[in-house]
Image: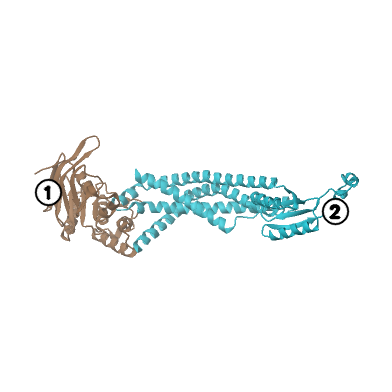
Chain colours: A brown, B cyan
């Protein structure tokens, strides 16, 4: 599903965020990406989502070489991804339901089918009763669950989560992990970036450790 | 295809909802567009009316053909037949015999004594030809044809006024075009700036949509629709302003025309011109929106 082959990312100014990183993630696999702040976890997720481009090496996602991907093909790659951002990136001007419907609108789903899917996703994360609310009125845990609903509503094959439990207490973090486990059980590939060691210990998944842009052996 | 159509319908409904959500801001943009567009539209309407007026005046561009003094009835008949063959280019022909001309001269009084002292009538027979086309080039061509006839001694064409009128209409046309281009550029800037502000307020939404796989076209579409909608409303407003102005001015113009013995009436722009105006304004709105969005997306 994901293949990093000696991938390097150097930002303008000469800062090497990643140096010769190589790893493979099989379809249906779940893995944690861990390391201290600035280790390069978010950079790896951004490279997979083609938000950033590698400066060296080869990166393949779902069989596509990201470095050689035409700009016009980028949107179609991203439609197969479920992205969970550290800062949520929720749209506060839209209702909870409309936030979840956004990926479906982008993919061109018709209104009725989109509504059905969005409600099913909200039901899955326990937010169906709040479909008409605005995200600003939700708690931190609810906002995170809303992000999860938005990330899975279009049934992606790969889910990328950047510090998904960083703003949550233990109970809510556990709920989120349970959801991840359930998604993985239905075949979704998951890559979760976190620096929370207790979280890693709660799920039986492969761990990729990064330090200063280098993947530990 | 259906999904593509759906995204269009969705973008359009979102634009309509957005306009209804911020009616004052949208109304102000339309007002600016409407008033700005009404200048070239109004000038164009005046120009079209001036053309119509010129058309009625043009009914009398005349060419005088003076025959040779020794021409007889056979020559007159020959010229008459030749003129008849040119009926496609000639509106009317009036023959003025040398005797009739002399009588008219005597009736005028001033030169009667001098004419009476001459041994013979010094005036030639003449044909007064009214051309169909007021175009100076057509008149010149006709003049050339008449000059080539052996029975004709002199051809007199007074089309200075026609040239002046044509030059004035050309100048007016170019002024309207120039005004339209300049104000059109201003409108592109107005719409572009409005869209730029909209983009800034919707920056988060654009970023999230982009990260979730929205294409450039998907992001661009609602802004283009907004530009077209604003342009259409601005164009409709300008058409209304022009129509009201014409209605306001028409009685005064009619009074003025009546003083000159003319039945000229100031006409509002016809439906085809209004349609062109709407198309033009919608195009300007779309262009302004396109430039603003593309500038943002490139960054």
Going by the picture, which residue comes out furthest to the top?
A: A13
Between disc 1 and disc 2, the foreground one is 2
Q: Visible in this render: residue A35?
A: no
Q: Dot 2, how many residues are within 10 Å of its Cα: few (below 14), some (14-19), or many (20+)?
A: some
Q: Quadrant of residue A189?
A: bottom left
Q: Which of B197 and A12 is in front in this view?
A: A12
User: x and y percent of residue B30 in the render?
Assistant: 50, 50
Look at the image and tell me in which quarter the C terminus of chain B lies: top left
Is B269 displayed left or right of B97 in the figure?
left
Q: Which of A45 and B116 is in front in this view?
A: B116
* Res. A207 mark: 1
Q: Which of B179 and B201 is in front in this view?
A: B179
What residue did someone put label 2 on? B99
The chain to which mark 1 is attached is A
Q: Dot 1, how many residues are within 10 Å of its Cα: few (below 14), some (14-19), or many (20+)?
A: some
Is B52 displayed left or right of A183 in the figure?
right
Q: Are marks 1 and 2 in contact (CB under 8 Å)?
A: no
The chain to which mark 2 is attached is B
Q: Do labels 1 and 2 share a chain?
A: no
User: x and y percent of residue B189 in the render?
Assistant: 46, 44
Look at the image and tell me in which quarter the N terminus of chain B lies: bottom left
Q: Residue at x 55, y 44 (%)?
A: B178
Give the Cα separation between the discs numbered 1 and 2: 121 Å
Q: Callout 1: helix, strand or loop?
A: strand
């Amino acid at each position: 599903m994901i293949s990093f082959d000696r991938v390097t990312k150097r930002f303008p100014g000469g800062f090497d965020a990643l140096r010769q990183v190589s790893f493979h993630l099989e379809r249906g696999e779940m893995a944690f990406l861990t390391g201290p702040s600035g280790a390069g976890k978010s950079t790896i997720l951004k490279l997979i989502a083609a938000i950033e481009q590698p400066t060296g090496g080869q990166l393949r996602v779902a069989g596509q070489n990201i470095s050689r991907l035409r700009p016009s093909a980028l949107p179609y790659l991203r439609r197969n991804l479920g992205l969970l951002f550290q800062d949520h990136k929720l749209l506060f001007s839209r209702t909870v339901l409309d936030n979840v419907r956004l990926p479906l609108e982008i993919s061109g789903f018709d209104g009725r089918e989109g509504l059905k899917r969005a409600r099913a996703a909200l039901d899955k994360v326990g937010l169906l009763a709040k479909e008409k609310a605005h995200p600003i009125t939700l708690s931190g845990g609810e906002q995170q669950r809303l992000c999860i609903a938005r990330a899975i509503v279009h049934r992606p094959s790969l889910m990328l989560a950047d510090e998904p439990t960083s703003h949550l207490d233990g109970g809510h973090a556990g709920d989120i992990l349970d959801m991840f486990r359930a998604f993985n059980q239905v075949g979704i590939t998951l890559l979760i970036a976190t620096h929370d060691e207790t979280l890693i210990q709660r799920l039986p998944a492969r761990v990729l450790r990064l330090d200063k842009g280098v993947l530990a052996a | 295809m259906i999904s593509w159509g759906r995204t269009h319908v969705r973008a359009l409904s979102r634009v309509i909802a957005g306009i209804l959500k911020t009616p004052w801001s949208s109304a102000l943009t339309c007002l600016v567009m409407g008033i700005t567009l009404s200048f070239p539209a109004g000038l164009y309407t005046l120009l079209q009316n001036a053309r119509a007026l010129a058309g009625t005046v043009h009914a009398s561009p005349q060419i005088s053909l003076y025959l040779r003094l020794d021409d007889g009835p056979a020559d007159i008949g020959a010229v008459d037949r030749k003129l008849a063959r040119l009926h496609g280019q000639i509106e009317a022909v009036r023959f003025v015999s040398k005797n009739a001309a002399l009588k008219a001269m005597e009736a005028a009084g001033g030169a009667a004594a001098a004419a009476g002292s001459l041994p013979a009538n010094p005036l030639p027979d003449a044909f007064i030809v009214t051309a169909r086309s007021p175009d100076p080039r057509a008149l010149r061509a006709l003049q050339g044809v008449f000059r080539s006839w052996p029975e004709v001694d002199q051809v007199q064409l007074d089309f200075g006024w026609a040239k002046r009128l044509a030059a004035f209409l050309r100048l007016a046309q170019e002024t309207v075009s120039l005004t339209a281009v300049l104000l059109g550029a201003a409108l592109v800037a107005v719409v572009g700036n409005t869209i730029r502000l909209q983009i800034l307020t919707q920056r988060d939404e654009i970023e999230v949509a982009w990260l979730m796989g929205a294409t450039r076209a998907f992001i661009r579409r609602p802004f283009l629709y907004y530009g077209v909608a604003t342009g259409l409303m601005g164009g409709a407003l300008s058409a209304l302003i022009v129509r009201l102005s014409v209605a306001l001015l028409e009685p005064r113009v009619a009074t003025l025309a009546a003083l000159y013995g003319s039945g000229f009436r100031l006409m509002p722009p016809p439906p085809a011109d209004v349609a062109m105006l709407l198309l033009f304004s919608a195009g300007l709105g779309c262009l302004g929106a396109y430039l603003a969005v593309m500038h943002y997306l490139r960054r």
